[in-house]
């Protein structure tokens, strides 16, 4: 089984996935967990992944482009 996690904070998963049942499952090749940094797929020089909501208002939203690019990258990995 393959699990891909997309995050702008990929470092926070190493402890969780490197312990207990998940660690043993990975060592036995039962599960493959891949954590991807969404910022690596951003196309601007500042590696921006969030934006203001359309129409204004409070909060931030994720840009589609970096997420789409990350998903396409994962799709290419699984097809080969």
Image: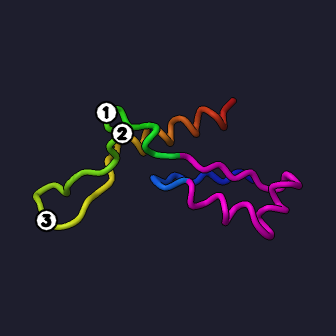
Cα distance, mark 2 to mark 1? 5 Å
Position of residue 79 in the picture relative to residue 73 (left or right): right
Q: Count numbered badges in the picture.
A: 3
- Quadrant of the image for the C terminus? top right
Type of colouring: rainbow
Confirm or deny contact between disc 2 and disc 1 (CB under 8 A): yes
Query: Where are the magenta residues, as a range?
Result: 11-36
At horizontal 85% and vertical 51% (from top left) the residue drawn is 29
Q: Which mark is residue 4?
A: none
- Which residue, given by chain and number where applicable, does mark 1 sit on? 44
**x, y (%) of residue 50?**
30, 51
Q: Quadrant of residue 75?
A: top right
Disc with the residue nearer the chain's start (1 vs 3): 1
Position of residue 61 in the picture relative to residue 5 (left or right): left
Provide the secondary structure element on which disc 1 rests: loop
- Which residue, given by chain and number where applicable, does mark 3 sit on? 57
**x, y (%) of residue 13?**
61, 60
> Mark 1 or 3, which is nearer the eye?
1
Cα distance, mark 3 to mark 2? 23 Å
Q: Quadrant of residue 14?
A: bottom right
The question of residue 66 being in magenta is answered with no
Provide the secondary structure element on which disc 3 rests: loop
The question of residue 14 being in magenta is answered with yes
At horizontal 23% and vertical 65% (from top left) the residue drawn is 59
- Which residue, given by chain and number where applicable, does mark 2 sit on? 47
Q: Which residue occupies the foreground of this view, 55 or 26? A: 26
Crowd around label 3: few <14 · some 14–19 · many ≥20 (10 Å): few
**x, y (%) of residue 11?**
57, 55
At horizontal 45% and vertical 52% (from top left) the residue drawn is 8
């Amino acid at each position: 089984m393959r699990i891909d996690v997309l995050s702008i904070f990929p470092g926070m998963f190493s402890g969780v996935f490197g312990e207990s049942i998940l660690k043993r499952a990975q060592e036995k090749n039962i599960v493959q967990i891949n954590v991807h940094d969404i910022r690596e797929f951003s196309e601007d020089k500042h590696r921006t992944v969030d934006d203001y909501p359309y129409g204004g208002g409070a909060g931030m939203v994720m840009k589609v482009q970096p997420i789409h690019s990350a998903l396409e990258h994962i799709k290419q990995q699984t097809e080969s």
